[in-house]
Amino acid sequence: MPLGKRAIAEFFGTFWLVFGGCGSAVLAAAFPNLGIGFAGVALAFGLTQLTSVYMIGHISGSHINPAVTVGLVLAKRFPASDMGAYIVAQVLGGIAGSGILYLIASGKPGFEMGGFAANGFGAHSPGQYSLLACLIAEIVLTMFFLLIILGSTDRRAPAGFAGISIGLALTAIHLIGIPVTNLSVNPARSTGPAVFVGGWAVEQLWLFWVAPIVGGALGAIIYQMMAAEKPQTAPGQTRTAAASA
C-alpha cells in the first residue's frame, strides 16, 4: 500500500480515536444526571481503538499513536523511513478530531472550555498527582500498551483477535490512568485538545510526548528480549552450521 494512502488512514484513525474518546469526556461524562464517568470514558477510548483496528488495520496497521509507531520501528516491525509521515498524519488527525469536537461542544449555551479533555500534571491532574507520579504512570502504562500490541500482533499469536485485546488494553489503561493524568499514552491524543486549550495544556504537553515515547521504546525493547525466537536447526545441519547461517 502506498505511503500516502497509509498516512491518510492514520489521519482518520487518530481523528476517530480523539473525537470518540475525548468526545465522550467532553460531551457525555459531565452531562447532568447522565454522566458516564471515568469507566465510560475508558470504554469509549477502548472501543474507538478496537474499531479503528478493524477499520484501517489492513491499510496502515492502525498505529494511530506516535509512541506505537516509534515502538514498532524499534521492534523492527515497521520501517523507520515511514515513521515521519505516520506521526505527522497522527498529530494532524488528533487536532482535526479535537477541532470538530470543539465546534460541537461550543454549540451548547454556556459552554466553557475548561480542560477540554487535555492531559496535565500537578494542579491540572484530575487527582492532583505530582509531575513525577504522572511521568512514571505514563511511561509504565505506555510500556505495557506496547507489550500487548506486540504480543497480540505476533505471528505466533491467535489470528484475528488483535483488535479486541488492544482495545481492551486501552480501556484498562484508562481505568488506571484517568485519575492521574487524564491518561494520554499517545502524543497525538494529547496534542489535539492542548491546541484548543492553550496556556497550561501546551506548557505541559512536553511530558505527554516524552513519557509515551520512552514507554513505547521500553515496551519494544522488553518484548524483543523476552519473545525473540532462537534460530531453528534444519534437518541435517549441525548446531554450528545453523548458528552461522
Image: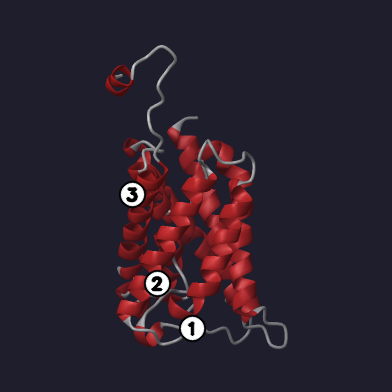
Q: Say whether marks 1 and 2 touch (CB < 8 Å).
A: no
At a point 53% along the width and 56% down the height, the residue shown is 15
Q: Earlier in the sequence, mark 3 or mark 1?
A: 1
Judged by depth in the image, the label closer to the viewer, 1 or 2, is 2
Q: Earlier in the sequence, mark 2 or mark 3?
A: 2
Measuring from the top left, give residue 49's x and y in whole percent.
58, 56
Q: Who is closer to the viewer here, 235 or 68?
A: 235
Disc 1 target residue: 114
Quote the CA–CA distance across marks 3 and 1: 38 Å
Measuring from the top left, give residue 125's x and y in whole percent.
42, 82
Considering only vertical position in the picture, is 110 above or below 205?
Answer: below
Q: Which mark is residue 221?
A: 3
Q: Which mark is residue 21?
A: none
Q: Is residue 68 in sight in this rendering?
A: yes
Label 2 crowding class (10 Å Cα cut-off): few <14, some 14-19, many 20+?
Answer: many
Quote the CA–CA distance across marks 2 and 3: 18 Å
The amino acid sitting under disc 2 is Ala
Judged by depth in the image, the label closer to the viewer, 2 or 3, is 3
